[in-house]
Image (cartoon, rainbow, N blue to C red):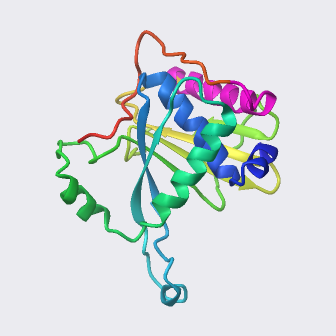
C-alpha cells in the first residue's frame, strides 16, 4: 500500500480510506458515499501553540463509479481529503444549519459512518490476513458507539497498519462486522496486487449499511 500511496502522491491513510469507500459502496449499493471524520482545525499558525481542543467534524464525500481503477480512486480520495481539510475550521453545526439537514432522533446529522486516523492506539492486537494490516473488532459489552460504524486507523511501529472497527450492537451482529473486516482486507490486498484493475460492482442482495449524505 505504501507503493500505491507514493505512486499517487497520497498518504497511506488516503489509500486505506479509498478501501473504506469501496467497501461502503459494495455494502450499500450507493455510488455517492459520505462519511464523517474529525479534523484538528489548527491550520492557522496562531493556534498551534494554544492549549485546548479545536477538533471539528468534516464530511468526506466521495463518488465511487464502477470501472474506475485503484489508482483513480486513490487519487480522487486524496484530492477530496485535501479539499475537505481546507474547510476544517468551518463549524459542523453551522454546516448542518446551512444544508438544512433533517434532524432525526437518535441519529447524527449528515452521516452514519465515520473514519479517523489516530497517532497511536491501546487496542488489542489480532491476526491479520493481509501482511502488515490488522483489522479487529474491539467493541465491548456496555460500550457506546457514537455512530453506526467507525473505522479507526493507526500506523504502529511494531505491528504496522492497524484498522479498528467500532459498531453499534443494536444494528450489527459481530459476525457481520467480522465479515466486513475480511472484505476490507481483501479490497486492500487487491489494491496492491493489481492497481490498474477496474473496480467491479459487487453489491450483496441484502444491503447492510447506510452511508449516503442525508439531505
Magenta-tinted stretch = 175-197
Q: Nearer the viewer, residue 103 or 96?
A: 96
Q: Residue furthest top?
A: 205
Could you tell me which residue is drawn at 71 percent across and 38 percent down? Answer: 134
Picture residue at 71% right of the left edge, 25% below the top: 197
Of the pair 138 and 31, the residue shown nearer to us: 31
Between residues 60 and 70, which one lies in front from this camera angle? 70
The quarter of the picture where the N terminus appears is: top right
* Image x and y of residue 111, in percent: 34, 43
Q: Is residue 90 left or right of residue 35?
A: left
Residue appearing at x 43%, y 9% in the figure? 205
Q: Using the image, determine if residue 64 lies above or below residue 46.
A: above
Q: Quadrant of residue 209?
A: top left
Residue 142: x %, y % from top left: 41, 42
Q: Is residue 191 magenta?
A: yes
Res. 59 in view? yes
Q: Is residue 158 magenta?
A: no
Amino acid at each position: 500500500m505504501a507503493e500505491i500511496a507514493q505512486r499517487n502522491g497520497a498518504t497511506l491513510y488516503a489509500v486505506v480510506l479509498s478501501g473504506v469507500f469501496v467497501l461502503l459502496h459494495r455494502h450499500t449499493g450507493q455510488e455517492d458515499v459520505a462519511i464523517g471524520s474529525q479534523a484538528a482545525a489548527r491550520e492557522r499558525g496562531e493556534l498551534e501553540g494554544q492549549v485546548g481542543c479545536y477538533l471539528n467534524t468534516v464530511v468526506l464525500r466521495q463518488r465511487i463509479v464502477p470501472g474506475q481503477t485503484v489508482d483513480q480512486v486513490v487519487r480522487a480520495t486524496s484530492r477530496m481529503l485535501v479539499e475537505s481539510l481546507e474547510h476544517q475550521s468551518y463549524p459542523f453545526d453551522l454546516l448542518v444549519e446551512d444544508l438544512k439537514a433533517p434532524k432525526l432522533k437518535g441519529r447524527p446529522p449528515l452521516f452514519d459512518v465515520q473514519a479517523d486516523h489516530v497517532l497511536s492506539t491501546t487496542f488489542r492486537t489480532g491476526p491479520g490476513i493481509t501482511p502488515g494490516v490488522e483489522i479487529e473488532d474491539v467493541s465491548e459489552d456496555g460500550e457506546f458507539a457514537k455512530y453506526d460504524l467507525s473505522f479507526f486507523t493507526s500506523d504502529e511501529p511494531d505491528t504496522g497498519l492497524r484498522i479498528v472497527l467500532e459498531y453499534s450492537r443494536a444494528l450489527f451482529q459481530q459476525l457481520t462486522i467480522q465479515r466486513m473486516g475480511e472484505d476490507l482486507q481483501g479490497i486492500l490486498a487487491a489494491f496492491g496486487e493489481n492497481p490498474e484493475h477496474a473496480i467491479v460492482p459487487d453489491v450483496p442482495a441484502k444491503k447492510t449499511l447506510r452511508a449516503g449524505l442525508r439531505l
